[in-house]
Image: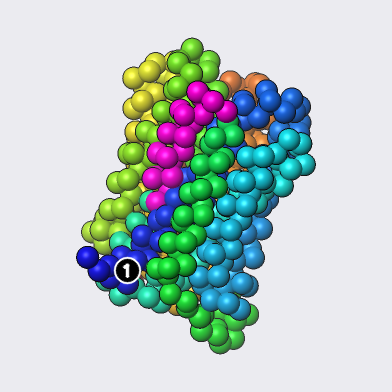
């Protein structure tokens, strides 16, 4: 069976994004207990390494655009695949905090290199009708990565945390090969009067950028504190990897984001995703000691998380089709800043409010933002924006 251009790009993109986001991006937190025990690192060092991985992600986001302009949109995805593979190998063999940090930063930065360039690749190689589906499939590759990561974590429980990183290195190499074989080289057309186009780009992205601030903050708080909630609830040790796998399995519905965006419009889909994230956060915060509530939270979160990231790719490509990669990158950078600030703010308020209250407040913020998006969509400006899509 011969794949269409859209099918080839979707398959390669889902593989690369699945490894970079679904595996390399979350593996550090998942393997943190084993790293702490074997390398005997202080909480300060472990925290600094965690922050450095996010700095690597932000650097990849900012450097991917200039590289794509010089070498084509496939070049950053190739660099990201190499970073994921090399970083995972270094972490696998690391015996010192410096090697651990270097590998974790490289692996964590892979996501910044690979995600946004696929928006440009899709808009230049896939037919207009198939673009929303292709973007949704690529983004939902994260679900597959999370499922594999959960499986690796269960296997590692029988051996060493290094097995997780060794598996990521193997997967990164395989995804990079698929990417080079299936994705064509693309060159970005020069943009006329770039400085004068910047304000129009900022104006077009005001609403999705606002969505990014709240979406990424809610997601990073959930992933940061989910393991803590499960530990406090005296649930089985396998609960954390199972949580990751459950999020990945239910997140597969994100492949339908393109069709949902055509039917409902991207703005409404984004609002519904925030409602799902609000429900998941509230369940985790208020009933995290219950196995049934935790399972329900993971299922709902998987749907909101994966659909929420896919709709951002679709939404920005709809609003700025001639600069889809730049538009998506802009919203991702805004989200990255929000992701840095949210845990710091959460850490400051948890001693006074408690973890459950924090998650409840996070849920309230997501719900209020969803209501604001719906009201904007019903307003005159929101309706005009929808009609232009």
Name the quadrant of the N terminus. Answer: bottom left
Between residues 9 and 336, which one lies in front from this camera angle?
A: 9
Residue 144 drawn in magenta:
yes
Residue at image position (51%, 84%) is 189
Image x and y of residue 313, in percent: 42, 60
Q: Is residue 306 visible?
A: yes
Q: Quadrant of residue 381?
A: bottom left
Q: Is residue 383 above or below residue 236?
A: below
Between residues 248 and 339, which one lies in front from this camera angle?
A: 248
Left or right: 381 as drawn, with respect to 84: left
Residue 308 drawn in magenta:
no
Q: Quadrant of residue 345?
A: top right
* Residue farthest toward the top in the current orientation of the protein: 234
Left or right: 223 as drawn, with respect to 140: right
Q: Which residue is mark 1?
A: 6
User: Predominant secondary structure in magenta?
Assistant: helix
**SS state under label 1:** helix
Image x and y of residue 388, in percent: 33, 72
Visual colour scheme: rainbow
Image x and y of residue 211, in percent: 47, 52
How many other residues sit within 10 Å of disc 1, few (<14), some (14-19) or many (≥20)? Answer: some
Name the quadrant of the C terminus. Answer: bottom left
* Residue farthest toward the bottom in the current orientation of the protein: 192
Residue at image position (65%, 29%) is 35
Between residues 351 and 250, which one lies in front from this camera angle?
A: 250
Q: Is residue 342 above or below residue 291?
A: below
Residues in magenta, as a range:
141-160
Q: Is residue 380 visible?
A: no
Image x and y of residue 169, in percent: 55, 47
């Amino acid at each position: 069976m011969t794949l269409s251009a859209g099918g080839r790009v979707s398959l390669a993109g889902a593989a690369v994004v699945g490894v970079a986001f679904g595996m390399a991006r979350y593996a550090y937190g998942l393997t943190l207990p084993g790293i702490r025990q074997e390398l005997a690192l202080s909480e300060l060092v472990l925290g600094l390494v965690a922050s450095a991985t996010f700095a690597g992600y932000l650097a990849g986001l900012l450097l991917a655009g200039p590289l794509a302009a010089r070498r084509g949109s496939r070049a950053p995805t190739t660099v990201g695949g190499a970073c994921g593979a090399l970083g995972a190998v270094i972490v696998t063999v690391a015996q010192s905090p410096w090697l651990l940090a270097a590998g974790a930063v490289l692996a964590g930065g892979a996501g910044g290199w690979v995600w946004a360039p696929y928006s440009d690749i899709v808009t230049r190689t896939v037919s207009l009708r198939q673009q929303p589906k292709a973007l949704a499939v690529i983004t939902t590759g994260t679900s597959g990565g999370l499922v594999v990561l959960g499986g690796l974590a269960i296997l590692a429980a029988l051996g060493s945390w290094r097995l997780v990183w060794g598996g990521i290195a193997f997967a990164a190499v395989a995804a990079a090969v698929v990417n080079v074989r299936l994705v064509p080289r693309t060159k970005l057309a020069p943009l006329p009067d770039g400085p004068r186009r910047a304000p129009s780009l900022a104006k077009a992205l005001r609403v999705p950028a606002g969505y990014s601030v709240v979406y990424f903050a809610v997601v990073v708080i959930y992933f940061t504190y989910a393991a803590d909630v499960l530990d406090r609830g005296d649930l089985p040790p396998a609960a954390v990897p199972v949580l990751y796998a459950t999020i990945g399995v239910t997140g597969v519905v994100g492949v339908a984001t393109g069709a949902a965006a055509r039917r409902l419009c991207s703005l409404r889909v984004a609002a519904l995703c925030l409602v799902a994230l609000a429900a998941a956060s509230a369940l985790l915060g208020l009933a995290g000691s219950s196995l049934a509530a935790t399972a329900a939270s993971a299922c709902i979160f998987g749907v909101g998380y994966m659909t929420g990231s896919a709709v951002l790719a679709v939404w920005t490509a709809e609003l700025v089709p001639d600069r889809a990669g730049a538009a998506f990158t802009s919203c991702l950078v805004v989200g990255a800043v929000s992701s840095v600030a949210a845990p710091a703010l959460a850490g400051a308020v948890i001693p006074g409010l408690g973890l459950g209250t924090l998650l409840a407040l996070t849920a309230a913020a997501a719900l209020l933002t969803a209501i604001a998006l719906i009201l904007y969509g019903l307003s005159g400006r929101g309706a005009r924006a929808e009609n232009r899509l």
